[in-house]
């Protein structure tokens, strides 16, 4: 996985049709299946200040990504309070990852425009300061759980993680049946 | 999400109460929303910490147990439950921690670490430590558990115990994870064990070491009289951050000690330009101005350095480093009396005679009988409070 660079684009239109379309813009390494790391952190997502809802969208995406990745037994995740406890305004995300002991850093941005949500996720190896993958995703806010699930799947895929049977069913499950909740 | 955002913002004292309302409303929409039960429980726990009303804690426990009955595999619920139990009856809970709901998880060590952070956030240091120790027992083979414990102990100034935890982490981490060894190196440097620090550093893949460690070990080599190794590491540090003026100054100092004056001056000039760039963005930064004066003196431009010291003398923070640098400027610019006076002040503020003897700018001063007497008397001078 080290040094590989994968750029994935999951098209929102494909999502709305219920299909997931992966576009590999560059791929140097095949997925080995076995992750060569044990620890990971999902940093708080940056938001576009243009729309007041972007902040909540970013929080929601980060929260769900963190929660879903925690389901996987193969990887240990830092919690958000842990990030805030160790975070120092002066330091870079790699320095923060070092303090947290997180080999992989997932960071990203989220943007909300009318009823469309979009996110760009960057996955990096904090040990080598190298890029693993960039993921761009676009989807409808009415199907926000599909959006979050596909985002998680893209991250899991990029990291070469393979969910086991019970983990797969947990990953598929929506957190609530009511978007209002 | 609104509730979580309110809960995170600790500046609003009513925040947890608003969050409780929002989570209750979420549960009205979906009573089986396990995450909302957990979030409500956590919000109630925070309100209990502020109000000390026991019924709040009872309600919090009911909520988190509801979440567990809906989804027993969700790791956040046992984490909140553990925090509640540790808060409700700390002495009893600490004895039974980790609780069975937590040990039943597939990653109980991860959950124990999250409990530790929760207890640390509310200032319960003893319980945070219990939780971290539990993480190492629940997941003894994972380097991160020992690393986290080491970070916690180091933060509390318990360097000896932290060293042991980092050594355990290093023994379990893959060669790609050098952070435990880096922390071990730094702790040995803090304890003055330069040789021990270098031995640990040499055992890791140097190309993965962070700039801070590389730089500190470079300085250790210099102090041990190994300038070639020191220069090699400083050059590596410069590869990692070529725009750090302090690094250029330190490389210049080592080259100066080796009588490579031209190369030393080149690094001083590079450092000077970088300080000028930084000052363009932060013109009122007195630390940068002092650095500008020092590098000007090192490049032989005393006409620029000395007027700066006159202005800075009134604005700088009184510290060992400040007086050391001012004394160095005076020494480099042949203002011997001022250099000796300022050096005396630096020694009173805690500058060690060994550092004075090792710095090239004080070489001529140290040869003077007056300064030698001052350095030998330094132990009788009480340190500044």
Image (cartoon, coloured by chain):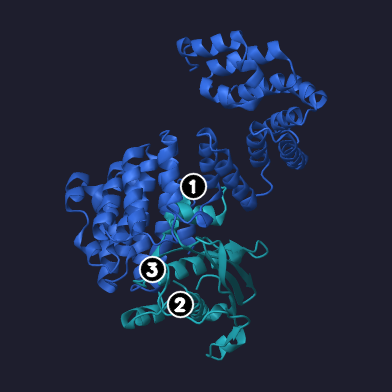
Name the quadrant containing residue B144.
bottom left
Q: Judge the density around disc 1: few (<14), some (14-19), many (≥20) Cα neighbours within 10 Å.
A: few
Density class for disc 2 (Cα within 10 Å; few <14, some 14-19, many ≥20) is: some
* Residue position for label 3: A75
Q: Nearer the viewer, residue B296 or A76?
A: B296
The C terminus of chain A, quarter of image: bottom left
Q: Chain of mark 2?
A: A
Which of label 1 and label 3 is nearer to you? 3
Q: Nearer the viewer, mark 1 or mark 2?
A: 2
In the displayed structure, does residue B171 sit left or right of residue A69? left
Is the Cβ of the residue at disc 1 closer than 8 Å to that at disc 3?
no
Report the residue marked by disc 2: A160
Q: Quadrant of residue B204?
A: bottom left
- Image x and y of residue B289, in percent: 72, 31
Compare residues A174 and B100 and report the one nearer the observer. B100
Q: Is residue A167 above or below residue A91?
A: below
Chain A: what color? cyan
Q: Residue at x 38, y 66 (%)?
A: B36
CA separation in Å, label 1 and label 2: 42 Å
Circle 3 packing at 10 Å, graded few (<14), some (14-19), many (20+), is some
Of pointers 3 and 2, the one earlier in the residue sequence: 3
Residue B204 visible in image: yes
A49 lies above or below B349: below
Quote the CA–CA distance across marks 3 and 2: 11 Å
Q: Estimate the spatial distance between the alpha carbons at disc 1 and disc 3, rounded to whole Å.
A: 35 Å
Say which chain tag 1 marks: B
Name the residue at 56% across, 61% down: A129
């Amino acid at each position: 996985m080290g040094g590989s660079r994968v750029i994935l684009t999951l098209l929102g239109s494909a999502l709305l049709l219920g299909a997931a379309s992966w576009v590999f813009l560059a791929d140097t390494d095949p997925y080995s299946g076995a992750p060569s790391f044990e620890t990971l952190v999902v940093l708080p997502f940056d938001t576009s200040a243009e729309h007041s809802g972007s902040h909540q969208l970013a929080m929601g995406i980060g929260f769900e990504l963190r929660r879903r990745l925690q389901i996987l037994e193969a990887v240990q995740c830092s919690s958000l309070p842990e990030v805030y406890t160790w975070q120092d305004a002066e330091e870079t995300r790699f320095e923060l990852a070092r303090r947290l002991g997180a080999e992989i850093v997932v960071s990203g941005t989220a943007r909300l425009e009318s009823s469309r949500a979009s996110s760009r996720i960057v996955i990096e190896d904090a040990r080598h300061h190298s890029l693993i993958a960039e993921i761009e995703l676009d989807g409808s806010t009415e199907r926000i759980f599909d959006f979050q699930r596909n985002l998680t799947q893209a991250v899991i895929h990029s990291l070469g993680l393979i969910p086991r049977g019970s983990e797969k069913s947990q990953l598929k499950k929506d957190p609530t049946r009511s978007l209002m909740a | 999400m609104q509730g979580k955002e309110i809960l995170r913002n600790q500046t609003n004292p009513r925040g947890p109460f608003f969050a409780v309302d929002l989570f209750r409303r979420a549960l009205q929409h979906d009573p089986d929303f396990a995450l909302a039960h957990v979030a409500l429980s956590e919000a109630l726990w925070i309100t209990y910490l502020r109000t000390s009303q026991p019924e709040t804690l009872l309600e919090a426990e009911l909520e988190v147990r509801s979440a567990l009955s809906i989804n027993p595999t969700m790791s956040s619920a046992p984490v909140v439950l553990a925090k509640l139990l540790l808060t409700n009856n700390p002495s009893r809970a600490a004895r039974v921690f980790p609780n069975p709901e937590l040990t039943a998880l597939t990653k109980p060590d991860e959950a124990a670490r999250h409990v530790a952070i929760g207890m640390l956030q509310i200032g319960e240091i003893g319980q945070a430590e219990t939780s971290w120790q539990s993480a190492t027992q629940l997941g003894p083979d994972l380097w991160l558990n020992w690393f986290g414990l080491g970070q916690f102990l180091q933060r509390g100034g318990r360097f000896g115990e932290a060293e042991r935890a980092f050594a355990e982490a290093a023994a379990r981490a893959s060669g790609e994870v050098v952070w435990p060894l880096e922390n071990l190196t730094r702790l040995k440097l803090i304890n003055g064990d330069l040789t021990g620090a270098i031995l640990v550093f040499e055992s890791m893949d140097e190309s993965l070491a962070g700039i801070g460690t590389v730089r500190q070990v470079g300085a250790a080599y210099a102090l041990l009289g190994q300038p070639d190794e020191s220069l090699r590491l400083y050059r590596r540090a410069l590869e990692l951050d070529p725009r750090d003026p302090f690094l250029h100054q330190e490389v210049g100092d080592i080259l100066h000690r080796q009588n490579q004056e031209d190369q030393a001056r080149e690094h001083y000039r590079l450092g000077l330009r970088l300080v000028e760039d930084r000052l363009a963005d932060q013109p009122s930064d007195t630390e940068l101005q002092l650095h500008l004066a020092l590098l000007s003196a090192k490049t032989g431009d005393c006409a620029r350095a000395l007027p700066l010291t006159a202005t800075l003398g009134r604005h700088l923070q009184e510290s060992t480093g400040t007086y050391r640098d001012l004394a160095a400027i005076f020494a480099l610019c042949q203002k011997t009396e001022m250099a000796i006076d300022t050096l005396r002040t630096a020694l009173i503020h805690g500058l060690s005679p060994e550092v004075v003897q090792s710095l090239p700018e004080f070489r001529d001063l140290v040869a003077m009988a007056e300064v030698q007497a001052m350095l030998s008397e330094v132990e009788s001078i009480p340190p500044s409070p």
